[in-house]
Amino acid sequence: MARPMTLAELRSSGWRSKSVKQEIHDNFIAKLQAGEDLYPGIVGYDDTVLPELNIAILAQHDILFLGEKGQAKSRLMRLMASLLDEELPYIDDRQIPVHDDPYRPITKRGRQLVNSVPADEIPIAWWPREERYAERLAPGTKFADIIGEIDPAKLAAGVSMGVEDALHFGLIPRMHRGIFAMNELPELDELVQVGLFNILEERDVQIRGYPVQFDIDVLILFSAN
């Protein structure tokens, strides 16, 4: 079947919106029922690590992989992407910096489109599974890299500092509806850890004291030796 290319076609197709954790949960259950190999290439953890990982997926938790070097922490994190849908629809608009949910947009521009433009005129594109996973090594990572920063070019153009349009989003906001993995968590700068904790607990972004409320939908994975 041809993929829906407008919001009207998407609604007619019967596609339903899910959180990324619910999506992973549902695909995990489907693989269990089909008897598929959940973690191909992983050997020796059937009675220890994997049962705990399974529980975390079913409970829809963010996950910390803690262990010695060479114990497949990064490989297990990357395998989590195999539990995503093959493709995911999003609003196709260059002014939207994230892959906004056509049914539940979190950006101002996305909400304006959905509320004021006819559904058959709102273009839909599809985000492939392999692009919905991003990974970062903690050493050297700055707040702007993964959370965001005020964009001076936008300020020079006359945009007010305290609004959404003034922000340059980091990796985590840009992975809205995907998976973000941070390797070597203890090596991460303390200020960045605080910003990550705020996202874990409140799911919002605060940049330079300006709270911009986003209902960020992301599965966050960590590894630590």
Image (cartoon, helix red, strand yellow):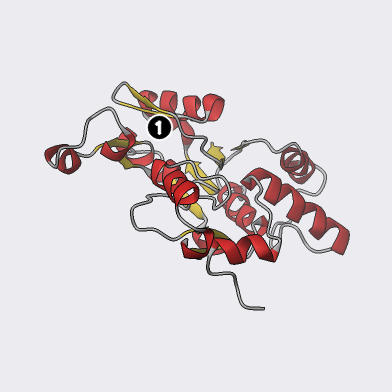
Residue extending furthest top? Answer: 209
Kind of residue sitting beneath label 1: Leu
Quadrant containing the N terminus is bottom right
From the viewer's perspective, tell me whether residue 127 is left or right of residue 193: right
At which x and y percent is residue 2? 62, 78
At which x and y percent is residue 69? 55, 44
Q: Which residue is mark 1?
A: 188
Q: Determine if residue 44 is in view.
A: no
Q: Nearer the viewer, residue 144 or 114?
A: 114
The answer to whether 139 is drawn above or below residue 115 in the figure is above
Query: For numbered disc 1, what is the local secondary structure?
Result: loop
Residue drawn at point x = 39 percent, y = 46 percent: 109
Q: Nearer the viewer, residue 61 or 115?
A: 115
Residue drawn at point x = 47 percent, y = 53 percent: 99
From the viewer's perspective, tell me whether residue 55 is left or right of residue 209: right
- Mark 1 neighbour density, 10 Å: few (under 14) some (14–19) many (20 or more): some
From the viewer's perspective, tell me whether residue 166 is left or right of residue 117: left
Q: Determine if residue 107 is in view.
A: yes
Quadrant containing the C terminus is top right
The answer to whether 110 is drawn above or below residue 196 in the figure is below
The answer to whether 221 is drawn above or below residue 122 in the figure is above
Q: Nearer the viewer, residue 11 or 32?
A: 11
Residue drawn at point x = 61 percent, y = 38 percent: 67
Residue drawn at point x = 80 percent, y = 59 percent: 31
